[in-house]
Image (tube, grey):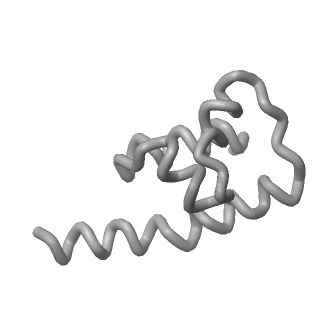
Amino acid sequence: MHINRLVERFLREKDVPPTKFGRLAARDPRLVLDMRMGREIGPEMEQKIRQFIATHAQQIDASRNEIL
């Protein structure tokens, strides 16, 4: 899946604000906005984002289940 679609899907499904995602995934709160505006993501950043999503998707679900 293309990295932009993967990020947008993660944001929507996990209800994470774009700035928070960018800050946590890459220490860049403008990451998602810049990607939406056409910013090209290099291979290292793409790998970092994919790793963040893979690691944190399950953690977010688990923490939400604890709250409920």
Q: Report how many numbered discs are placed on residues in the image.
A: 0
Compared to residue 53, the image places residue 18 above or below, namely above
Answer with left or right where residue 8 lies relative to residue 58: right
State whether residue 14 is above or below residue 9: below
Q: Residue at x 59, y 50 (%)?
A: 22
Residue depicted at 58% across the width and 67% down the height: 54
Residue at the extreme top? 37
The single residue placed furthest to the left in the displayed view is 68
Q: Is residue 66 left or right of residue 31?
A: left
Name the side, left or right, on which 56 lies relative to 48. Answer: left
Q: Quick one: quadrant of the C terminus? A: bottom left
Q: Quadrant of residue 59?
A: bottom left
Residue 44, position as x, y percentages in the image: 86, 59
What residue is rendered at 66% in x and 42% in y?
31
Q: Is residue 10 left or right of residue 52?
A: left
Q: Using the rendered view, name the quadrant where residue 37 is placed.
A: top right
- At x 67%, y 67%, the residue is 51
Where does the image place residue 14, in percent across and percent down from the top left? 38, 52
In percent of width and height, residue 50 lies at 68, 60
Quarter holding residue 64:
bottom left
Q: Position of residue 1 (x, y in %)?
A: 69, 44
- Farthest residue, direction right: 43
> Is 8 placed above or below 65 here?
above
